[in-house]
Structure formats: structure tokens, C-alpha cells
Amino acid sequence: MNLLEGKTAIITGATRGIGKGIAQVFAQQGANVAFTYSSSVDAATALEKELNELGVKAKGYQSNAASYEQAQELIANVLETFGGIDILVNNAGITKDNLLMRMSEEDFDAVIEVNLKSVFNMTKAVQRTMLKQRKGSIINMSSVVGVKGNAGQANYAASKAGIIGFSKSVALELGSRNIRSNVVAPGFIETEMTEKLDEKVVDGWRNAIPLKRGGTPKDIANTCLFLASDLSEYTTGQVFNVDGGMLT
């Protein structure tokens, strides 16, 4: 029996990296998957095809989670196609790194809007459905940077720390209705984005991690799988640092 058989998940920002890894693992475990993307139509079409071939229902939606209206519209469309939503994974995110003295107001606002406001938009949009069902699992993607901070990432760290406070509050508000809200805080995860970095720099990061390697999207997806499934039905309001021991 697959862990997510018969469940429907919605995952934001799923055409690459961690989001794609989560979509693949969820589909392999029997979940129907609705996912969003911002611009990469070809990647979305390819992922849709790949997931459908696993025998589940999958559909990509071009939607900006930072827009309140688009989030509302998205959830209405997903409900029409899939009939319900059991799992929400808020994964969409951007970085606009700079030292505070060089950071523009636009770069601060953009990161807060895409990373943090999107979590409010999507949670608000899906809340009514989960309340009606009296069940649901909300998984919000933070970062070790949101837990410990990072020079040159004040905007990103603020957005990711905000996600933690938001998620804990939602866990307290919705727990009596059997809706769970948890946070995954990835450490150094090797994706298409990190491949462009200098190999020596990356090796330095790997050596500083107790497990001596960067994480993979699948490492994060497996923690999300636990939180999405009934294995975690007594777990809410928690932050899971999936970082190879980086914050130990």
C-alpha cells in the first residue's frame, strides 16, 4: 500500500529542484498531484507527463503564489479537477541576495512577497476545504537560514523565519480540526542551481557538514512524505531541520 494512496497534493514551484523531487516522491507513493510553476512551460509539461505515467492524476498550473487573487483562483481550479485537497506544500521561493547596505527596497519586498506572503495566500485559499474535510496537512518550506540567519541574506532569512512563526500559529489555530501545519528547513541541497557554483566552494560546504555531503531533493521529499502521510498524524507545529547535521 502506498503511503499517499487516494490523497491529493498541491505543490507550489515544482518544475525543478526540491519542488520537483517532492512531486515525484508523492506521485510514486500514490498521490494525485497539482503543481504550480511561474514560467517554465516545457518543464511543467514534461513533469505532468512523467507523473501521469506513474498512474496518478497530475496537472500543472501557471500561477503566481505571491498574488492573493491567483491563489484563490488556483484552488478553485484544483478543486474542480481533483475534487479535494489533502496536502499543501508551500515550496515556491526566490533569492535576491545582497549585504543590507546594498539591498534595495524592491529586493526586500519581492523576497518577502514571493516567499512569505505566498504561504499566507495559499494557506488561506486551501483552509476552507481542509476545514470542511476536517483533515489536512500543510507543509511549509523554510531553510536553515531562517533558523540561524546568514550574512547577505537578510531578506531571505526574514522570509524563511516568518514562515516558521506563521506555521506554528496555524498549527495552534487549526489543530482542533485535525489540520496539521509543519515546517521543513533544508540545509545545503544540491540542485541545478548549485551546479553553477565553484567546485572548491561546494567541497568546502560539504566538509563542514557532519554527514559530509550535500542533501538531495529526495532527502527533503522523504521528510515531506512523512509529514504528508498518516505516519505523522500526531505531529504538528514542528520544524524539521533536514541539513545533514549542519545546525547540530
Image: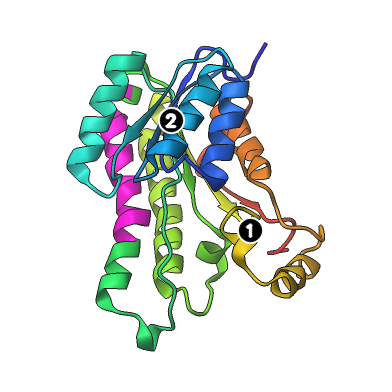
User: Pointers 1 and 2 in contact (CB under 8 A)?
Assistant: no
Tell me the amino acid under the disc marked 2. Thr
Q: Is residue 118 magenta?
A: yes
Give SS at disc 1: loop
Q: Is residue 107 left or right of residue 87?
A: left
Of residues 64 and 138, the one drawn nearer to the viewer in this rendering: 64
The prevailing secondary structure element of the residues shown in magenta is helix
Whole-percent x, y for residue 156 in the image: 43, 66
Q: Position of residue 153 (x, y in %)?
A: 46, 73
- Determine which residue is flagged by label 1: 187
Q: Which residues are magenta?
A: 112-129
Rendered image quadrant of residue 115: bottom left
Q: In the rendered view of the protein, which quadrant contains the C terminus?
A: bottom right
- Residue 126 on the magenta span: yes
Quadrant placement of the N terminus: top right
At 52% across and 15% down in the image, what residue appears? 56
Which label sits in the foreground, 1 or 2? 2
Residue 88 in percent (x, y) is at 42, 33
First-in-chain label (1 vs 2): 2
Please give the residue where the numbered disc 2 appears in the rendered image: 45
Task: Name, please, the residue furthest toward the left.
Answer: 69
x then y, percent, for residue 60:
38, 30
